[in-house]
Image (cartoon, rainbow, N blue to C red):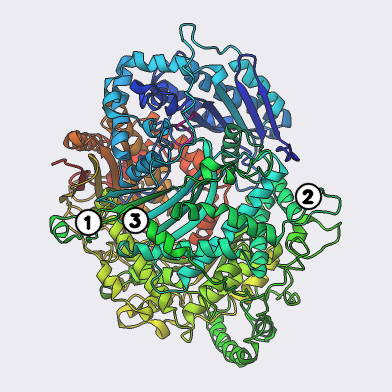
Amino acid sequence: MGTPVPQHPQLVSRVLDNGLELHVLRNTTPADRLQVYLEVKCGSIHELEHEQGIAHFVEHAVFLGTTLYPTAEAIKARLAQLGMSFGADSNAFTDFRQTVFTLNCCLDPTRADSCASAGRADAETTPRKRGLSTRSAQPPTPCSSQLSPPPAGLSLTESPRVTRGAGGRMTRQRAREMQGVALEAACELLYQLAFEALMLEDAVGTERGAVLSEEQSRDTPDYRAEVASLQHMFVGTLLPTRLPIGKRDLIESWGASDLKHFYRTHYRPENMRLYVVGPVDAADAISLAEGVFKGASAAPDAAPATPLPETALQLLPPSSRVVVHQDELLTQFELVVTSRVPLSPVRTVEDIRLNLLDGLVMHALADRLEAVQQAEAAPPFVSAGWGYEDSFRSGCGALTLSVTAAEVREWKEAVVAVAREVQRMRVHGLARAEMEHTCQAFMRELLVQAEQVHTTPSSEMIESLLECTAMGQTLMDSAQEYDVYHMLLHPPPSSPHKPITLKEVNARAKEVLQFVVDAALPTSPPSKPAPKRHPTKQGAFNAVACRRSPGIFVAAPLNLGPGLGADSEARAERLVLSETDVLGALSEALSEVPPPVVVDVPLELIPGAHLRDLAALAEGPCFVERGSPSDERRGAEEDKTKENRSKEQEGRDDEDGRQPLDAGTINGGLGSKTPGNTSPKAQSQSAVDKRAPARKPHKRRGPPRHVHAESGVCQLLMSNGVRVVYKQTQFECGQVSIQVTARGGRALETAHKAGAVTVGIQALLGGGACGHSAEVVGKYAELHGVDFTGNVNAERLWLRSDCGVSGGGLERGLELMHLFLKQCVNEENRWDTAACERAKRDYRHGHEIMQRDLDLLVGAKLTEMMTPDHRFTQPLPSQVAALDASDLGGSVARQLVRGNVHVAVVGDFNPQQLESLLLLYIGGLTFPEVSAVTSQEGAAAVGKADGGSETVNPGDNCAVRPCPQGGCGGGGAGEGVDAVKWGRLGESGRVVLKSGAKRAVTALALPSAGFWGRMPWDVLDVERPANAGEENGGSGTMSSGSQIVGGKRKQPEGEGPREMDPLLVERMRHPLWCNRVLNLLSDVIENRLFQEVREKQGLVYHISFGVKQYEYFFQHGIALIHLNPDPKKIDSTIAEVHKVLADLRGGNITEEEILAAQSPLLNSLRSAMQCNEWWLNRCVTVALNNSGVEHISDLLNFYGSLTISDLLEAMRMYFPHMSPMWEVVGVGGDIV
């Protein structure tokens, strides 16, 4: 049977007497959260013909009330007592073969007791789902606020306490008791949902509207294509006829009795699994769960479920060799070749061996396809790849080759290009040097995961446990996986397993890619199956029924026209696709192909001698006192001297460090031979670390670090004007995130170069750097485990490097950052023209997709109505096409000027090493002065920045002037940045897609306050108060149109002064009061909208409210409402929304609503603060503002101190009225 792989050491499983399975996994990250899932082994394929969709409806209905909690409100209240919100911390989804209920529990009762009721109640909280499952995804909608409340943690320490008492820390025994209380409560709630649901007729009738709204919102072009693919590949099975969402006419016909019958039939203990993952003792958890569920049994009047027929998931040949699915709303051509194979759960070392072989082939092929893309200005495809995946939901594994064409007209060229690389891999396999690189990169990725074995979040572990258990696969931790994979590459002398060889990998490549040949050139099947490789994998790729029956699925638009309007349809050219054409394109690629050309990857992208000479200079980079203009100016002069000296070295250093990687001798295996007492992880890095001799650490010179005692955030300033903010954490073991940010973004784009920054940052990332090609840079980053990305928004531009510390990863991450920054600021570095053309074409593709996506069109239309300003609207493809490489490069370089470059670093690093490397790689760069980069159109936006408030002082030499915290006059922008041009408030618009499903999308918007509390009075339909903008302080109160005088608020003319609570007055003087109170107020408003419009009226499936607040260049904020109403009830739904908002604007907010929003918000803040991502965002903010770190420590207490008075005051100040609003309605299908 092969050598079994080790099971996760913390996993304990048991089956109760009533058949319920228990699986408990102890995991201590995070220390204050517990994940509890209940899986019902019943999904849509268990439905009868007249029950299609009932499993999903039942999933919704169990949350409408149970015996112990008779209403949905009672269930929400119980969740709040456990420190959970409905939707974020409690959820559910239905798939083909399972229904799963999930709880994310808080283990600290001091947090849970502060709640009185829960927030949103939605079994699936978002309209778009992952695949055909009803499982929630979190895609951003075009009208979403994109506002995440600034999260916080339990404390500013690394290890949160479980509870606190008068004596300080809880004892370990007390902590264990509280964990048991939380687990028992979670199990008790799941027991109620699984066995005691009421499903009352009135509640079911109301929830039916939400289910139908979800069915409508799901019917998108991509969803229809996925359904067509399912019907092609799974012909003869139940999957194509049992989609989880079900059929609309059946959903409308069911009553409560129908749901109860399905519930009693399938919700039985022997048909369930309970999963518990968190910082709990396994024995205690099993005992507690058994105590709750031991009495569970099937309903006495329930008959057993009808067994699935043998054909439910059988492997049959596809319905035809080629199926072409065309849809008017599709914008791209995609071809997928699929061969289904039996499931191959991983249980033995032999299974891992095949996974390793497949992984190496997939990795190498992906590199080759990426190289093809990067070699041309107009590559024929935008994405492609081969892969193998076992899928429990479909009951089989699948070999797939996918191709997405760059241009629909050139789909044949795309298919040929990708299939030719597949044929090259199948015929020639990997070259030896390619194998070395692939193995090292593959193992580097596994090493990064292994290093985080003790910091992997429980939310990820429970997902792995759920999948492995359902498939009958052995769950291992990441360190165990790494050890097994490493052993197969470097087996010890006593191992019975032979090392992986190049010959074996190439044989596997030929085997697993044969299905592409079979699809294009079918031959008669052999008389008998090929021999099995071993008992568990069963040589699945050689099985006759699978290998000889691959299918080809094509999804493409109907027309080649540019748009969907009546005029464009008249000009559209019909896209004609036939089976002969598709097979012909594949066959053309399967001709003779030459061997691959392997690109050498250098040891270092920056010659080591160059950096050493730079560091040795007496005037080398150093740290200076923050906020010292003289030091910064002296640093600028030193930078110029260093630059001149370093240029003298470049001539002789160009060839340094360009030798190919030496991965050791391959004698039947891979990698260098290492002593037996060397750790596997060290062995895996042996080849990676064979560089030039280690450099002498660069000594940090300058003043002491400015460290915030409570948070541990450190601030520094380098002599070249770069500000550095970092925080050392251990949330993700061995991982570091480095972000370089510049104020600017789209705010500095000019009208005749709209889109230059957005497209420019993508061209930068796709074009290599400083003479190194994109392929070399990409492989170098891959080899060292560095993920290098970048992006831009309305007010910022940033580059980011995520890397591991081990094996020199931190240095390599900073080395890449150095190269990309130098590419921008050094005028001698020309931008890759091909990369610029690819970036412009990618933008055009995205614009074309938007024209056929109802949600995106509604968002674009709303933005156009709010403002025609080019900095907020999407540029036309013709505008982007007119940009050249100098426009793109100049738009980015213009923002990377002295005083406007800020570095934030968060992760598990050594501070001294980090500072040394920062000086070496970032401190040695010379950023141009403002005058050196500004052209006429950009000069107005660049200049000195003054201190905007008592807490924000960007410095004397800031290159790009943002909007000061306390004031940006009526112009609505920072100095030199044009004011926002607003549309007329109250305008409405309509977007119609004449084809597609019957669905509706609605977006509403209203001006509100910016981050610092400033209001866009010039667009609001109210008279601007005389004293608005006259005050310059951090507080939002100073920008509201009223002034606090002696504890009284001086109101605008016509209103008398109001007495105010002194504590409220004090809170309002906080510079972040506006931002924080609007975060909480947004949740209160969204909860009310959800309760009234979704729960009570059943008018929508999804509704959201949020405020997007601009911070640097623009003074305003935008309140956004997004909903998916029933197409027949659009007007009545919008009217109900306005009714709710008017009620809130009138001051009708209750204490209970505050608590219902406050507790989930605080819990989300606590959890988020235990993540690197949250701290990175905070460090970026501190760096950009040159202050504000002290406000991190008061975050939780401040949110907890907000009262109904704060929210009522914020409602008066920042929402002078809730009507009129901008309004856009989008409709699809044949709706008029």
Write down the quadrant of residue 252 in the picture: top left
Mark 1 or 2, nearer chain start: 2
> Bounds of the magenta span?
88-100
Amino acid type at image mark 3: Thr
Residue at which label 1 appears = 866
Please give the name of the residue rendered at 42% of the width and 69% of the height, measured from the top-left corner: 761
- Residue under label 2: 497
Residue projecting furthest to the top: 300
**Front residue of 695 and 930:** 695
Q: Is residue 94 magenta?
A: yes
How far apart, in angstroms, are the residues tagged by discs 1 and 3? 50 Å
Residue 730 seen by the camera: no
Q: How many numbered circles are shown?
A: 3
Residue 642 figure quarter: bottom right
The location of residue 167, given as percent across then percent down, is 70, 33
Q: Secondary structure at mark 3?
A: helix
Q: Picture quarter containing residue 342?
A: top right
Left/right placement of residue 592 relative to residue 734 reads left
Closer to viewer: mark 2 or mark 3: 3
Screen quadrant of the C terminus: top left
Return the residue at label 3: 580
